[in-house]
């Protein structure tokens, strides 16, 4: 049973990345640009462009060649170090991912080979292959532990995967201790990220409340009390325990009650003066301003007034002669 072809292809690709080399055409392009570059800033900009496009070899080739032309520029040297570190780290991650994939494939395939051996007890070739795979798998445990050590600072999640795989192969106290330490670190990172997310959401919530209160104040100043109440109600949903929101709600409610009382008295006067339709319109406006306090009282008045108005309309329709 051979290893999957894709594993071999990945191994070839990783091995081919052991040294960054430029093709003849790429070298010519880099030399041509460097010859025309008038400043270190132009070189840095071009290198960053190459790196953003994934052409790390060209970026490092340009930066390395530019050191002689701009020997005093420290930013070029720092960028070389940064890109080299990034390239080495990416290569290391690829290598360890390959190690994980290959190890997982062996762990999952070995039971199948052992099952095959049960049906062929006299097949010594299968037995020898099982022993070879078991030995090969056992030898990967130290590699996986080293993977966890190497990547603990750079990629703690991949480090945990390596240590978890190592522990599947060999449950040693050292591996268990390292795995627990890495898991604790990941938990701390995730808790910190969660706390930061909570703080961000709280800041955004506070900003929304501040905006709603500001808009409510503008509505109140323009006499749009119902719209102001809607804004403050929304702010109250965002911050139900906020003393400031509750204070503004109380002030607005008091203002709404005062406006509603004025309109109710106006409606009463219109009703007494037999201006029933106008009275109904004024009472309905008052009800919108203060529905909680005036619901029962105003609903009865409006219904009674509408009944009177309907009777008047009926009488008027009966007494008025029809058109010829």
Image: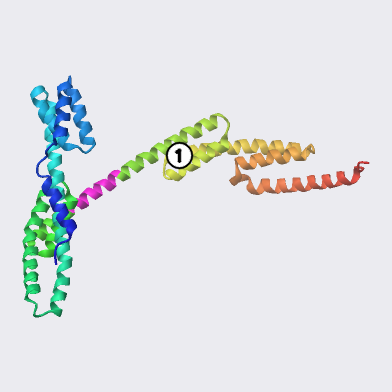
Residue located at (15% from left, 65% from top): 107
Q: Quadrant of residue 244?
A: top left
Q: Quadrant of residue 305?
A: top right
Q: Is residue 265 left or right of residue 256?
A: right
Number of numbered callouts drawn: 1
| Residue that numbered label 1 is attached to | 245
Residue extending farthest to the right is: 324
Magenta portion: prevailing SS class: helix
Residue located at (39% from left, 41% from top): 205
Quarter of the image with the N terminus is bottom left
Instruction: State the image coordinates of residue 200 (x, y, percent, origin top left).
Output: 33, 41
Q: In the rendered view, would you say 98 is above or below 169?
A: above
The reply to whether residue 144 is visible in this rendering is yes
Q: In the rendered view, would you say 174 is above or below 205?
A: below
The reply to whether residue 152 is visible in this rendering is no
Q: Is residue 87 left or right of residue 260?
A: left
Q: Quadrant of residue 298?
A: top right
Q: Which residues are magenta?
A: 184-196
Instruction: State the image coordinates of residue 138 (x, y, percent, origin top left).
Output: 7, 64
């Amino acid at each position: 049973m051979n290893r999957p072809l894709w594993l071999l292809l990945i191994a070839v690709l990783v091995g081919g990345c052991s040294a960054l080399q430029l093709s003849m055409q790429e070298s010519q392009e880099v030399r041509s640009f460097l010859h025309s570059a008038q400043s270190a800033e132009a070189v840095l900009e071009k290198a960053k462009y190459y790196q953003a496009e994934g052409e790390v070899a060209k970026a490092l080739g340009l930066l390395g060649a530019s050191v002689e032309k701009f020997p005093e520029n420290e930013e070029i040297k720092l960028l070389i170090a940064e890109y080299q570190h990034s390239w080495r780290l990416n290569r290391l991650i690829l290598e360890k991912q390959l190690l994980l994939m290959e190890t997982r494939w062996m762990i999952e395939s070995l039971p199948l080979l052992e099952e095959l051996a049960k049906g062929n007890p006299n097949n010594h070739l299968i037995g020898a292959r099982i022993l070879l795979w078991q030995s090969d798998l056992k030898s990967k445990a130290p590699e996986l532990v080293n993977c966890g050590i190497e990547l603990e600072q750079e990629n703690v999640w991949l480090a945990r995967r390596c240590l978890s795989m190592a522990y599947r192969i060999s449950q040693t106290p050292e591996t268990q201790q390292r795995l627990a330490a890495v898991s604790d670190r990941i938990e701390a990172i995730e808790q910190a990220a969660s706390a930061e997310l909570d703080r961000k959401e709280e800041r955004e919530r506070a900003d929304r409340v501040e905006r709603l209160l500001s808009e409510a104040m503008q509505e109140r100043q323009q006499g749009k009390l119902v719209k102001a109440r809607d804004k403050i109600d929304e702010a109250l949903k965002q911050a139900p325990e906020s003393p400031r929101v509750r204070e503004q709600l109380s002030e607005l409610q008091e203002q709404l009650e005062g406006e509603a009382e004025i309109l109710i008295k106006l409606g009463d006067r219109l009703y007494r003066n037999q201006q029933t339709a106008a009275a109904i319109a004024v009472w309905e406006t008052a009800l919108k301003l203060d529905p909680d306090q005036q619901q029962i009282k105003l609903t009865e008045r409006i219904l009674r007034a509408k009944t009177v108005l309907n009777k008047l309309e009926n009488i008027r329709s009966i007494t008025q002669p029809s058109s010829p």
